[in-house]
Amino acid sequence: HAAEIDKPEGEIWVSYAGTLSACYDLETLVSAIAEVQEVHPDVVLQILGDGSERENLKRVASAAGANVVFHGYLPYDQMAAWLSKSDITVNSLVEKAAQSIVTKIGDYLAAAKPMVNTSCSAEFRAKVESDGFGVNVNPGLAEEMAQALIELIEDEPRRVEMGRIARHIAEEQFDRPHSYMKTVRLIEKLIR
């Protein structure tokens, strides 16, 4: 479906995919985008998903003057196409979120785009840093997130390299049939 998506020349798309609920740090993301747009007015936040926080986020975006497009829930293949047309993905969790490595991480990585991560999971933060497919920022700090986004926007070679790494990690570690067979082999080895 990527061919069906018309991305205007010169726009930079930052994308979030998933539920719009209190466990995701989306107000910070919207506020950060408003700050980024003061420097780079060609940036658009694409929100792919829906949930109880949608109306609140629309109010936050309107009050901040942020250019945010709310797509609502999309069929999986269309959501994946939007991610593939994006320039940066955001894994935006609140500080106390229980999630570690959520399923959508595989989708973000498969899109071959750099990721800005606010998850406080030590396991995932270490992975982002050691694998090199994105940057970690602290949740709740719009200015810190905005700075990370600006640095990525202004460094296309870095974005491309992070995207290449992301795709490689997706194929090696998040392709379920491939990665599940590794688990099966490990279990078989352990029970022998």
Image (cartoon, rainbow, N blue to C red):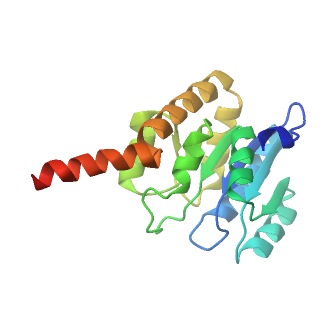
Q: Give the farthest residue toward the left.
A: 192
Question: What residue is at 66 percent from the left and 60 percent from the top?
Answer: 28
Q: Nearer the viewer, residue 191 or 29?
A: 191
Image position of 108 (left or right of 83):
left
**Image x and y of residue 44, in percent:** 81, 47
Compared to 65, does 171 lie above or below?
Answer: above
Compared to 23, does 70 lie above or below?
Answer: above
Q: How many marks?
A: 0
Q: Quadrant of the N terminus?
A: top right
Image position of 135 (left or right of 55):
left
**Image x and y of residue 140, in percent:** 58, 61
Q: Quadrant of residue 73?
A: bottom right
Image position of 93 (left or right of 57):
left
Q: Nearer the viewer, residue 9 or 82?
A: 82
Question: What residue is at 53 percent from the left and 40 percent from the top?
Answer: 135
Q: Nearer the viewer, residue 72 or 69?
A: 72
Q: Is residue 137 visible?
A: no
Question: What residue is at 82 percent from the left and 55 percent from the top?
Answer: 68
Q: Nearer the viewer, residue 178 or 171?
A: 178
Q: Give the farthest residue toward the top.
A: 157
Compared to 140, does 54 lie above or below?
Answer: below
Question: What residue is at 77 percent from the left and 74 percent from the top?
Answer: 56
Q: Is residue 103 visible?
A: yes
